Amino acid sequence: MLNHGSGRLAPGILQQIGRTPLVSLRTLGAGLPVPILVKCEHLNPGGSVKDRIALAIIDDAEARGLLAPGATLIEATAGNTGIGLALVAAARGYRLVCVMPEKMSHDKRAALATLGAQVIVTPNASPADPENFRNVARRLADERGWFLTDQFRNPANVRVHAETTGVEILEATGGRVGAFVAGAGTGGTISGVGRCLKEQVSGVKIVLADPVGSALAEWVERGRCGADGSYAVEGIGGSVAPENLHREVIDAAERVSDDESFATALRLIREEGLLVGGSAGTNVAAALRIAARGEVEGPVVTVLPDSWDRYRGCAWMRPAGAGA
Ligand code: PMP
């Protein structure tokens, strides 16, 4: 039954960021020795976990006096941080430029343009290449005097996950967590939540979910990145470890193929009513494996980083027989 009675006047949309529900997977998690609990970050106002860091980074820059009224922000983004920043920039009166690699979905590009951000698309270039999206963003910030929000390095990213996402998981579970699993784009989610949980929950395992083709799993296991290849899941994995990915809080890595990620995301959509993107499939596929091994004492917790609405044009969203 529809649960009503808590209708309330909110002071503004930015206050609705965070405090997302933690939901148990009734169908996908059935029969496992421990529950799978998923944090619904796709329900944030901008549709992703990145709303949290967008607000935290801008609050931090304002507090340190780095943003003049009407300032221009620039970020290298797979799309979700751009959408979060655009939302906060709109509410606070800043201009936003997003530098995005070509491989990212057209839906995200279109969303950023609709939000009024300027979008610069770069080739899918390696980190050493001057045309790599991070290098282009840094160069433009230097040349034009724009504020680089710098999600890959900015400590406000990891901090907000330790102080909000991690604390909310502790509150919702009463501190009973067997393992926490997440993919890493910037590393903010896994490093921040991982740090918070390790401080509070003895024996908790922190596990990186990494796309097959990313070099980060090997970096977790051996301390150096191996060869990387291509993969289609967006927003996670990479060929080098970003500064905000903290190896000391991560215990292990699980590799997940594109096929398994997208199949699991479709199951979340169809069997659980969780309207999520591909990296949620990566995270949940890894979480299911960890739970099935029976080696952890408490629930396996993970995050659903973003919403399905930014992948509508992607092939994996149009399964065979679904028509155009
Ligand atoms: N999934 C998606 C779809 C993302 O866009 C991101 C961020 N790039 C992540 C997961 C990973 O989050 P983090 O940057 O905190 O590692």
Image (spheres, rainbow, N blue to C red):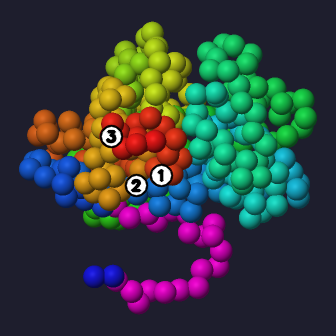
* Residue in view at x 50 percent, y 34 percent: 234
Instruction: Please tell me in which quadrant of the rendered image residue 126 appears.
Output: top right
Q: What amino acid type should be assigned to the residue bearing mark 1? A: Ser
Extreme-bottom residue of the structure: 5
Labels 2 and 3 touching (C-beta < 8 A): no
Mark 3 or mark 1: which comes first in sequence?
1
Amino acid tagged 2: Leu
Q: Secondary structure at mark 1?
A: loop
Q: Residue at x 64, y 28 (%)?
A: 101
Which residue is farthest top?
227
Label of residue 321 in the image: 3
Q: Is residue 221 visible?
A: yes
Label 2 residue SS: loop
Binning the other alpha carbons within 10 Å of mark 2 as few (below 14), some (14 to 19) or many (20 upward) gives: many
Counting residues from the start of the chain, the first of labels 1 and 2 encountered is: 2
Query: Residue 161: in sight, yes or no?
Result: no
* Residue 7 is a magenta residue: yes
CB atoms at circles 1 and 2 under 8 Å apart?
A: yes
Indicate whether residue 23 is drawn in magenta: no
Residue type at numbered disc 3? Gly
Q: Which residue is mark 2?
A: 275
Graded by Cα atoms within 10 Å as few (under 14), some (14 to 19) or many (20 or more), the crowding at tag 1 reads many
**Magenta stretch, residue numbers:** 3-22
Of the two numbered discs 3 and 1 in the rendering, the one whose residue sits closer to the viewer: 3
- Residue that appears at 53% across and 47% down: 310
At which x and y percent is residue 317?
41, 42
Q: Are discs 3 and 1 less than 8 Å apart at CB?
A: no
Say which mark, if any, is on residue 307: 1
x and y percentages locating residue 119 in the rendered image: 75, 39
Q: How far is disc 3 from disc 1 in space, using C-alphas?
A: 23 Å
Under tag 3, what secondary structure?
Answer: loop
